Image (cartoon, grey):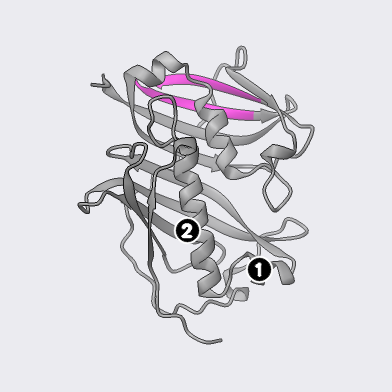
Amino acid sequence: MEEFGENKIERWTTVKNFECDFLQELKPSAILGLFQEIAAEHSELMGFGHTVLKKDGMFWVLSKIYVEIEKKPVYMQKIKISTWPHAPNKAIFERSFSIEDENGERMISAYSRWCVLNTQGRIVPASRISCRVTEFIGEKSVDFEDWLSQEPAEKGSAAFSIRVANSEYDLNYHVNNIKYADYIFNCFSVKELETRRLKNFQIHYVKQSHEGDLLEFYREETEPGVFSVAGIKNGAETVVTAKVCFDDADRV
């Protein structure tokens, strides 16, 4: 396979109104959407994108992502999104992301883990995936290894619930990973999000959800400003867990 030299790509965009929340700031789900789009584009350029894997009955899934926020981009702001992959291990593909403003100031950093599944839902070894990039970037956008995301100890009543329908689907016929960010942050009130500054969040994707599934989300404040969130499918299976951290100080 022909080698592809660009082990990092960058794209400029302007924050759209539909990507923003009631504060006209880029929503967590929109952040993940920008990352998903540039990762998909880069994987195609690297020779193992969706169009290639689909022919062999395989597809990408995001297993974990950590997002650190210095400052949220706002409506009409011009931003630069960057991504670069790290050398894969036996089955895990790691990828970094960043968002910068026009002055080159880092606003958001993210680090993610992906894997490839076959049509039977089994993980495909990295050795079976051809890649045009021969030299990977070792430096991550953010130093992070604390992949600890616990479920709330006491479930109580659900903070948010939704019955999955077709608009939640992605091209793999299950709930798009972006959608879970909206579900998770729907566990917080408008007042909470107005007064607290989001510092970071991480999401762990555990199982897939499909049309007709009832998803119920529960939250627990484990320490001041730190929340664990879990999404339960049909009252039985955990499909996603998350950890959401706000600054101790209120938003200024």
Name the residue nearer the viewer: 137 or 212: 212
Residue 214, horizontal then vertical, whole percent: 73, 27
- Looking at the rendered structure, the secondary structure element under dot 2 is helix
Q: What is the crowding at mark 1: few (fewer than 14 residues within 10 Å), some, or many (at least 20)?
A: few
Name the residue nearer the viewer: 189 or 146: 189
Residue 217, horizontal then vertical, whole percent: 60, 24
Name the residue nearer the viewer: 7 or 227: 7
Instruction: Say which quadrant the C terminus sits in.
Output: top left
Residue 215, horizontal then vertical, whole percent: 68, 28
Question: Residue at coordinates 42% horizontally, 44% vertically from top-left?
Answer: 66
User: Which residue type carries mark 2?
Assistant: Ile
Name the residue nearer the viewer: 102 or 27: 102
* Residue 38 circle label: 2
Q: Which residue is mark 1?
A: 51
Q: Is residue 32 above or below residue 8?
A: above
Question: Residue at coordinates 77% horizontally, 37% vertically from top-left?
Answer: 211
Question: Residue at coordinates 63% horizontally, 75% vertically from top-left?
Answer: 128
Q: Is residue 20 above or below residue 88?
A: above
Question: Residue at coordinates 67% horizontally, 38% vertically from top-left?
Answer: 168
